[in-house]
Structure formats: structure tokens, C-alpha cells
Image: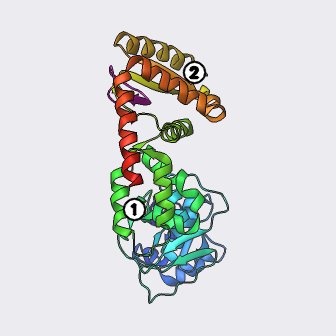
Amino acid sequence: MTRLHAFARTHHGLIDVTTADRLGLSLAAWYRALDGGPLELVHPGVARIAGAPVTREQLILAAVWACGPGSMSSHRSSALVWGVRRPMDDPVDVIVPARSRSARIEGVVVHHPRDLVDLRPVVRGGIPTTSPTRMLLDLGAVDRAGVVSALTEILRTRVVSHRSIAAFLTEHRGKGRHGVRALERALDAVTIDGRMTDSPLERRMHALLAAFRLPPCEFHAQCAGYEVDFRVSGTHIVIECDGWGVHGADPEQFDFDRRRGADLAAAGFVQIHVTWAQVTREPAQVARRIEAVIRQWAPDVLALHRAAEKRSGRASSR
């Protein structure tokens, strides 16, 4: 039992019958330990050490072991393993790659996928699980609404890059895979020009620029040693999206923003600040203000942009 306890401490309080036998606990002793003794049955062949706290990770690992060799947590459970916040009432999802196997475990959703691409288990927190890219694709098949938050967390923690996810989508697109469209939409929702957005305000601002056909802007451009939200391409005009939660509530952040603004001004940058209320309630006024600033400080850029629009319009009408 000492060896079993040592093993369970690094496996979420769990032990399986095969490992117990390897550590010296006979099958007869295993059943005696389950009969009101130091082990509590979770699934056939899988037990927790009596008194070990029950966690969601423990339930996921127990299901993976119960489903047999090669199994791994997937879909909603894989999202949780990769650090994504999930509803407490999520079922446990497990992928069993061998299609000849028909595992039936109480309280567990067992998946037998036809697509075995990128289906190699990755051990995360002691739990065999699908890769983060595969998780995002599978999650879209069972919880489309949850893909955006999962993708945001995966990109924020830099588990994988935007480029890797885009390449993965290209590989799976056109194969009739469930979840492809949900992941495509999520990727569009949380990134601009391949860079992750920091807030919904940035995404609304990007949409405003396109809707009012303003000159192209570089997202998260580097200016005078600082990263700005948008820079009007070919100009010294920057657009900053000011959210109160980030810029107003923290005194240190407030002070940093003032110094940053002064440094940008000293380097010759003209700054336009927009808020959520302005962008959502008066988008046309915001667009007119931005166009007026561009006309004042970079009239050639605006003229070239309008001329290109006219040429494009004539070409499309032919």
C-alpha cells in the first residue's frame, strides 16, 4: 500500500489494477482493498485511494484508464486539461482510437473518430489528452460556442501559435470534419491580421475601419518602442482603444499611459483615442473624426486610398 500511495500521489489519487499488480498487490488483495478498505472503486479496474479528494482531473484520468490503452481525454475534457475554464456539469469525453473497441463507461462520452490525423496523446498534468489543435477542432463538434474562449486561452498562454492553428485548419478543411467551421469562425473572431486581439473593443474598431472604408491600418504596430492598437499605414497616426477596465482602474497603468502618450507625441505621432461607447453608439462620428485627422496630417495617403477605391469600383462594375 505504501507503493500504491506513492504512485497515486502523482496520478490524481488514482491506481489501476494492472499497476497495482505490478507494485505487488495481487488481484485478491485488490478486491479486499475495495471491500470497505483503502481503495474506492471509480470504474472497473480503476480506484482512488480512500480519502483522496475528488477532482475533475481525477474523474477524467479515471475514465481514460478505464477505456483502455491508447485512450485519451478529448473534446470538453481536453479543453479543461489545457487550462480552459469549462462548465462544472461538462461530461467526461474520451477518444478511443481503436474502432474495434466499444468501451461503455458510466458517465463517460466515448468517441471513436474516423479521422486519426494528429491523434497522438500528449500527457498534460499527468493525463493523456489530445493536442491543443485537435482539442479545438473536436470541441467545435460538441460546443461551438465554447471554441472562442478555448482558442483565446490557448493563444494567450502561447501553447500554440496562430500560424500552427491556421496550418492545422488547412490540413483538415474539406474532409467533412465537424468543428472545422466553428474553429474558422473563432480564429477570425479573436485575431486581426494573424495577431491576437486584447479586447472586444479592438475587434469592433477593426470592423468599423472596414465598414467605413477607411485607409488600411496595421494592427498592434510598433511605434517609438511601444505597441499601439492601430497605426494608419504609411502615416504617424495611431488609434488607441481605451477600455476603462484596463486604462482607468489601475493607477500605475494610468501613469504609464500618460508617459507612453507623451513619448509617442515627442516622436511625432498623432493619437486618436476611442472608447467602447463611442465605437458602439456613434461609429459614423468616430469614422468621420479619423478621416478628418488623416486628411489633416496625411492627405496624400487618404487621396491614394480613395483613388484606389474608385479604380476598384470601376473594375468590379465591368
Distance from Cα at disc 2 to Cα at disc 1: 38 Å
In the rendered structure, does residue 232 fall within the stretch colored magenta?
A: yes
Q: Looking at the image, which residue sits at the far bottom? A: 100
Q: Nearer the viewer, residue 199 or 316?
A: 316
- Asked if disc 2 and disc 1 are in contact, CB closer than 8 Å, the reply is no
| Secondary element at image label 1 | strand
Amino acid identity at mark 2: Asp
Residue at image mark 2: 250
Q: Tell me if mark 2 has few (under 14), some (14-19) or many (20+) residues whose alpha carbon lies within 10 angstroms of its own.
A: few
Q: Quadrant of residue 192?
A: top left
Q: How far across and down, in percent of the image, does residue 36 sit?
A: 67, 73
Q: Name the front one of labels 2 and 1.
A: 2
255, above or below 244, in the image: above
Count every numbered label the image shows and give the total. 2
Residue at image mark 1: 123
Q: How far across and down, in percent of the image, does residue 268 sit?
A: 35, 13
| First in residue order: circle 2 vs circle 1 | 1
- Point out the image quarter for the C terminus: bottom left
In the rendered structure, does residue 163 fall within the stretch colored magenta?
A: no
**From which residue to which does the magenta span run?**
223-234
Q: Nearer the viewer, residue 25 or 68?
A: 68
Residue in the picture at 62% in, 57% down:
53
Residue in the picture at 51% in, 62% down:
182
Q: How far across and down, in percent of the image, does residue 140 sit?
A: 53, 64
Q: Is residue 90 visible?
A: yes
Q: Is 314 on the left or on the right of 31, as rendered?
A: left
Q: Is 318 on the left or on the right of 13, as rendered?
A: left
| Secondary element at image label 2 | loop
Residue in the picture at 59% in, 21% down:
248
Q: How far across and down, in percent of the image, does residue 275 sit?
A: 59, 27
